[in-house]
Amino acid sequence: MRAHERRARGALCILGVMAALSCICFMVLGVKANWTFILPFRGTKLLALVLVAYSIAVSTVLFQTVTNNRILTPSIMGFDALFVLIQTMVVFFLGSVALVAVDPVPKFLAEVVVMTAFAGLLFRWLFLGAERSLHLMVLVGIVFGILFRNLSAFMARLLDPNEQVTLQDALFASFNQIDATLLWVSCVIVAAVSLLGLRLVLSLDVLALGRAQAVSLGVDYRRTVAMILAIVAVMVAVSTALVGPITFFGLLVVSLAHLMVGSGRHVWVLPASVLLGIICLVGGQTVLERVFAFDTALAIVIEFLGGLMFIALLMKGAARR
Amino acid sequence: MIAAQQIRKTYGTMTVLDGVTLRIPARGITSIIGPNGAGKSTLLSIMARLMEADDGRVTVDGLDVASAKSDVLARRLSILRQENHISSRLTVRDLVGFGRYPHSKGRLTPEDVGHIDRAIGYLHLEDLADRFLDELSGGQRQRAHIAMVLCQDTDYVLLDEPLNNLDMRHARGMMQLLRRAADDLGKTIVLVMHDINFASWYSDAIVAMKAGRVAHHGSPAEIIRPEVLSAIYDMPIAVQDVGGKQVALYYE
C-alpha cells in the first residue's frame, strides 16, 4: 500500500476510535438515574447529534465538491438562513397555529420540500451556468444570507408578540431540546437521500476536478450537480430543523478532515468528515455537560473555532494568489 | 472526422467566433494557430462540448456533440484545457486514473491499471507518480494532465496549448509523443499552438484563425509562408526552409 493511503487509513482508524469513545462517554458518564430512563433519554439525544453531524459533514463535502472550492459551505451560502425564512413565512402567513397545531411530521416534510425547491432554483443558476469566480459566489452567498435573515427578522417584528414567541421557540432549537418524532422522520429522510447519493459517490472525485474536466470525462454534469444540490438542501433542512443553524461547523470538520487524511479522495474525506463531526458534537457536548456542567455553549464554541478556520482559509487563499 | 458548421459564439457584444466552418480529417495532427483573441480556445471548447455555441453545430464521426450522450462522447473524444484548477488534493496516479472514468466509471480494472501505468510511462512520470499535484512544478503538472488525457484512450484528443510551462526538452518530447500517437495508434490530435515553429515541424495540417474566422487551412508548407503569417499576426514574419521544413523568424 502507498504511503499516503496508509496515512489516510490510519487517520480514519484513529477518528473511528475517538468517535466511538465520545459516544460511549456520552452515554455512560455521570449516570445517576435508572438505566430504563437514561437509555432512551440519552439515546435519542445521541442519535440526534450523530444525525446532525452526519448531515452537516456530508452536505458540506458534497457542496464543496460541486462548487470546486474549499471555503464555501451551504451555511456560508445562506442555506440555513433560507430554512429560517421559510419557518418565519409559515407563521407570518398562516399564523402560529399552523406551526404548532399541525402534525409536525407532514409539516416538516412540507418544509423540506419547499426548502429543496427554493434552494434548487436559487443555486441552479449560480452553479450550473458559466463558471463563476469564488469571490462572486462568496459575496452572493453573504448577500443572500443577510437578505434571508433580515427578511425573517422583519417579518418576525410584524408578528403578534404571542406568535413571535412561538416562532422563536421553534427556531432557537438547541442540542438539548430535540423533537423525538421529528428525529425518526429525519433519520428516514437522511437515509433515503444517502441511498440516492450512494449512486453518485464514484462520480464525486471526478466532479472535484471542475466542470470542464468532469464534462470531458463524460459525467452528465447538469443532472448530477442538480441532484447533489438537492441532496445538500435536504440534509441542511434536516439538520437545521433539528438543532437550528450552526454556520461554521461544516467548514470546521471538513477542513480538519482534509488536513488529517491528506488526500482529497472522497473515500477518505467523507468518512473522516462524518467521524470528526461526531467527535466535535458528541464529544464536545459530553465535555460541556459533564465537565463544565453548562449546556448551551457548544454552538458558540464551535462557531468560534469554525470562524477562526474560515478566516485562516481566506488568508491562505489570499496568500497563494 | 470532426466537422464544424457555421459556429457562432458571442460574449455580450463581442463576437468571438463568426461563422467557423471547418473539417478536421481523422488521423494526424492538426494545429490551430492565430493571435490572442482569435477564438482558438473557444472553438476547441465548443468542439468538445465544454461550451455551447450560439449557432451552428459540431459533429464528431457523425455524433452531434451538443446532443450526444456525454459518456459516449467521452470514450471517443478527450480535451485538456489551458487552465486546470483542481481544488482537491490528488496524487499524479489518482489524476491519471481519472482518465479511465469513461470506461470503468470509477472502479478500476486490471486493464485500467495497465493503461494508467503506460500513460505514466509515456510522460516519464514514474518517479512522480505518488507525489501530490500541489508539490509539482507547472511543467510536471502539465505532463500529469496530459497523461490523464492520453489514459482516456480516445480516438480524438484535443489539447489547448499542450506545451504550456514545458521546457525545450519536454516540449520536444511531448510533440514526438503526439506524433507517435498519431502515426502508430491512428489518433486524431487537434492542438491549439502558440509556437508556430513546433506547429510547422510536427503537424499534418495547420488552421490559421484571425478575429473569429478561419483565415487559412492547409499543410504547413501552405500556411508557414511570409505573406500568410504576416497577415495573420499583423507583423512582418520571415520564413526559412530548413531541411524541407518551414521555420518562421519573427524575433526582429
Image (cartoon, coloured by chain):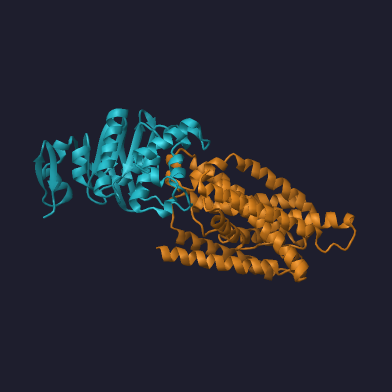
Chain colours: A orange, B cyan
Q: Nearer the viewer, residue A42 or B243?
A: B243
Residue situated in front as seen by the camera: A187 or A83: A187
Quick check: A259 above or below B177? below
In the displayed structure, does residue B239 sit left or right of residue B30?
left
Name the residue at 64% across, 54% down: A15
Name the side, left or right, on which B119 lies relative to B212.
Answer: right
| Residue B209 higher or lower than B69, as above or below | below
Give the position of the C terminus of chain B as an image quadrant: bottom left
Residue B24 in view (yes/no): no
The location of residue B126, given as percent across then percent down, is 39, 42
Residue B161 is left or right of residue A299, and the answer is left
Count of numbered marks: 0
Q: Nearer the viewer, residue A100 or B41?
A: B41
| Picture coordinates of residue A301, whole percent (x, y) | 65, 69
**Quarter location, residue A100:** bottom right
Q: Quadrant of the N terminus of chain B?
A: top left
Q: Residue B246: give x, y in percent of width and height.
A: 13, 40
Residue B230, image x and y in percent?
13, 48
Q: Is residue A225 left or right of residue B206?
A: right
Q: Is residue B130 above or below residue B25?
A: below
On the question of residue A279 being in view, the answer is yes
Question: Which residue is depicted at the point 32% across and 31% down?
Answer: B187
Name the residue located 87 percent from the left edge and 63 percent from the top edge: A32
**Residue drawn at (48%, 39%) of the image:** A219
